[in-house]
Amino acid sequence: MECNPKIKSDSYDFFKDIEKYINKMKDPQYNNESSQFSSNCKNFSDTMKSSFKDKQIAISVCEDIMKLYKSLNTNNKELTQCNEYKNDCGFFNYWVNFKISKNIINGSHCIYYIYNGIDSQFMQSNFFYSNSDNIYDIDKNELDKMNILYRLYENYSELKTIINATRQQDKRSLLPFSTECCTDYIQAKYICNDDDNNESTFCQKLKSFESEYEKLYQEFDRKRSEFSDNLIKLSECPNNKIITTAVTGTVVGLIPLFGVLYKFTPMGQVIRSKIGILNNDISNNDDEMTNISLMEQENEQLPFQKGTYNIKYQSL
């Protein structure tokens, strides 16, 4: 089946209101809506079960999509009127693509086709107006970039809630969300450091995020004494842009989060203090380990070769 994935000039526009959508899905009432969709979604899973690993996954995807539809369709404004509710329609199409692509068996069907299966089960519902004409398959590369932006704002939203909390007991640790922000920001910045991409819509939206995050950091800085840990500045996120890499051997891979843990957490202090001890131990036992290694080589061939690495990093 030809899916015709694409990206439109306004596909990213909903990010102007992204905090509204994230907060809407954090509302407890939002997550209490699933039961009313159970029967219809079970029927959907029966007809589309071959596209998912099991029926329960199909039901869950259907329920998640319909929860968002009903949440956006307040006051019967109808998501069919996308000229009037442009960003709502844009976010709904993104969410449909995200939920289905995340759970579907690769290559089974198009996003549009799967959504039509959900749409057809709710045609008689009093809250639902068919809007399948406004659903399209988003280009996979662009969807991946949208997912990065969404996760950035999702963690930003958590950080904002913590920093603006008035009760001390609501001031949770910033570091988990700040670290996750760094992970996605490094990836996003790497994409936008490419000269061919730095003026793309994605990169423009990333600049908007940077601006919002900087405002949040300034707010944190004013309240720094209220928190037990740090909010990492985007400019201080560890860099994983590799300029030159020569890798031979069996181990290939980098763990960018290690830099965050090493620099900003108590774990880093422990690691740094242990490095000196470890170096001493290695030095003291070097001769012994060499002898052991030579004896082992006499008895059997080692199944791997020592790797060489030539890795450099450049500031963002």
Image: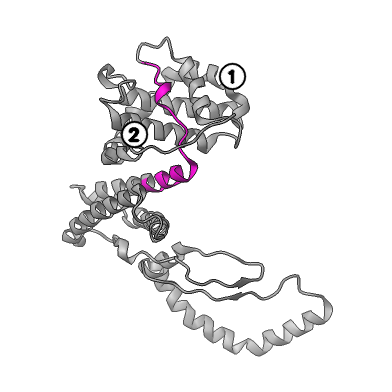
Residue 78 visible, this orientation: yes
- Give the quadrant of the C terminus: bottom left
Q: Position of residue 142 (x, y in %)?
A: 44, 44
What amino acid is found at the position of numbered circle 1 in the picture? Thr
Relative horizontal placement of residue 57, taking residue 70 as reference (left or right): right
Q: Secondary structure at mark 2?
A: helix
Q: Residue furthest front?
A: 196
- Give the quadrant of the N terminus: top right
Q: Secondary structure at mark 1?
A: helix
**Residue 47: image tag:** 1
**Residue 25: image tag:** 2
Tell which of 197 and 23 is nearer to you. Answer: 197
What amino acid is found at the position of numbered circle 2 in the picture? Met
Q: Position of residue 210 (x, y in %)?
A: 28, 55
The structure residue drawn at horizontal position 40% and vertical position 17%, both measured from the top left corner, is 130
Residues at circles 2 and 1 in contact by the CB criterion of under 8 Å? no
The structure residue drawn at horizontal position 35% and vertical position 53%, both measured from the top left corner, is 177
Residue 237: quarter of image: bottom left
Q: Residue furthest right?
A: 299
Q: Which residues are the magenta region?
A: 128-149
The structure residue drawn at horizontal position 80% and vertical position 75%, both measured from the top left corner, is 301
